[in-house]
Image: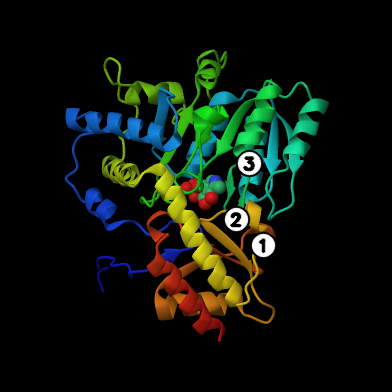
Amino acid sequence: MPIQSFIPPQRTLMGPGPSDVNPRILSALARPTVGHLDPTFVGMMDEVKSLLQYAFQTENAFTIAVSAPGSAGMEACFVNLLTPQDTVVVCRNGVFGARMIENVQRGGANLIVVDSPWGRAVDPQQLEDTLKQNPQANFVAFVHAETSTGALSDAKTLCEIARKHDCLTIVDAVTSLGGVELKVDDWGIDAIYSGSQKCLSCVPGLSPVSFSERATEVIKNRKTPVQSWFLDQSLVMGYWSGEGKRSYHHTAPVNSLYALHEALVILQQEGLEQSWARHKAQHQKLAGGLNKLGLDFIVPQEERLPQLNSVFIPKGVDDVAVRSYLLNEYNLEIGAGLGDFAGSAWRIGLMGYAARSENVALCLSALEDALG
Ligand code: PLP
């Protein structure tokens, strides 16, 4: 039998990502492919840059989309900024903080870990104490929205503390961008990366990044080449830079960038504050319904991410059986627990286009049925 075309089922995606993709974005993806140095495409890339500056609330000139998923944005920040002479304080409160640690270790920089309990925000006081005890530290890294637990950390305060101790900040905004307040310039973030597939509701595979002037200077003044050729942002900027002639670095994922452009146009049309407010409002509706079903949140209310709702699986309930039932009966995907919470939690995403009343209603009634 010859293999046939793949026609995926129509799911409602309410897990930790990818999120439901807005149909406008899917149709942008199907537009004709042009050359990646075509003047029309280059003009669109300039628009992606300025739309990303809006989404990140920054004037950073060095704001682009890495042609690979969020993990590549993460790696781009670490490999470009760090050398073995640096000391990085990584705040870990879940899986993705642990990945930052791996990036630091693999790059050979000195590492100091500040651990906060899983399901809680990073503790600013612990960071402050650690920086006081370790004046040699020159970088602080943390995850703004910990997707593995649903905890939101106070990025503004953590950046203030880092700045006071003369450290540059590296911030993971994969799940926060577009879903909760995030102000790169006001908060003084130096390097930030995100993902296309969460609250931007775009297809997976692109990682918006932004570097402050201070971070850009560090990259420019490196004495040793960045060990990754593909992620070397000085080379990538030669392709993304609006000034002068663009040089070929790699073949940009042309159609995916159309999709990101459309996702960012949608965000701009809605308005950033309105998008944050919509995520919060839908979260409140969902949280009320989940509580009625007897499901308890892992994260205390004031530290909760609206776009990622983690609840304990009730005693005696079969995790896999419930998630399979939702998928098979309702075409609804919710996420399994990750890391410390594997097998004991569900992660219900309300990201981007998925943060709508229809989805909340579907999720609550399907869960009621599955648990009934
Ligand atoms: N950081 C966080 C907080 C994430 O949630 C994820 C993915 O879920 C990543 C990094 C990695 O992104 P990607 O899977 O797009 O490589």
Return the x and y of residue 211 as percentages of the image width and height.
Answer: 49, 26
Residue at 68% in and 37% down: 90
Vertical order, 334 against 299 (above or below): below
Mark 1 near mark 2, Cβ–Cβ under 8 Å? yes
Q: Is mark 1 within 8 Å of ligand 1?
A: no
Amino acid of disc 1? Ile
Q: Earlier in the sequence, mark 1 or mark 2?
A: 2
Q: For mark 1, what is the residue? A: 298
* Relative to 179, 103 lies left or right: right
Residue at 30% in and 16% down: 243
Residue at 56% in and 27% down: 188
Please tell me which residue lies in front, 55 or 226.
55
**Is label 3 or label 1 in front?**
3
Q: Secondary structure at mark 2?
A: loop
Amino acid of disc 3? Asp
Q: How far is disc 3 from disc 1 in space, using C-alphas?
A: 18 Å
- Say which mark, if any, is on residue 154: 3
Q: For mark 2, what is the residue? A: 150
Vertical order, 331 against 128 (above or below): below
Q: Secondary structure at mark 3?
A: loop
**Is label 3 or label 2 in front?**
3
Q: Earlier in the sequence, mark 3 or mark 1?
A: 3
Graded by Cα atoms within 10 Å as few (under 14), some (14 to 19) or many (20 or more), the crowding at tag 2 reads many
Locate residue 161: give its quadrant.
top right
Q: How far is disc 1 from disc 2 in space, using C-alphas?
A: 8 Å
Vertical order, 214 against 367 (above or below): above
Return the x and y of residue 49 as percentages of the image width and height.
Answer: 35, 31
Rendering colour mode: rainbow
Return the x and y of residue 317 as percentages of the image width and height.
Answer: 63, 80
Q: Is residue 198 visible?
A: no
